[in-house]
Amino acid sequence: MSQIDRLVEQHFLESQSHLRHIDELMAKAQEARASNLVSTEHEGQLSRLAQDHARVAGEVHALRAKPASPEAVEHSKGLTGMLQTIGLELEKALTAIGDKSGR
């Protein structure tokens, strides 16, 4: 396995980990929505993050199907960073929702 293949694989595995974490956070957000704990402001933020998550997840899966290249390494690295950001934003939103609900 070449260095490029290893880097793409590493970024893919990191992305998969972030995707699982985001899925868990999205489930918590759905629970908060079901309990009517989500304000209009947070609802918009959660919807935007869900769209971003879906878009980036699609890019990760599309990139996985392509051959490894230096460009794929950079793209996969960027996607991993985007997923990390989405996860952090979701955590902040859920914390704010929990703080306002007294949980």
Image: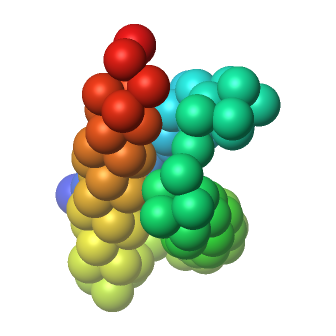
Which residue is at the far right? 34
Screen quadrant of the C terminus: top left
Q: Is residue 91 visible?
A: no
Give 1 or 38, whichever is nearer the viewer: 38
Residue at left 37%, top 17%?
102
Compared with residue 9, is residue 71 higher up or lower down, i.e. above or below?
below
Q: What residue is rendered at 77% in x and 31% in y? A: 34
Tell whether 91 sits left or right of 60. Answer: left
Viewer-closest of 59 and 54: 54
* Snapshot colouring: rainbow
In the image, 101 versus 94, the foreground residue is 101
The percent coordinates of residue 79 (x first, y second) are 38, 67
* Residue 68 place in picture, x, y as percent: 45, 71
Left or right, 17 with respect to 7, comes to right
Image coordinates for residue 74, horizontal then vertical, percent: 26, 77
Q: Considering only vertical position in the picture, is 19 above or below 52?
A: above
Residue 84 appears anywhere in the view:
yes
Residue 96 quadrant:
top left
- Give the residue displayed 57% in from the left and 44% down from the top: 38
| Residue 17, x across and y down, in percent | 43, 34
Residue most toward the top? 103
Total marks placed: 0
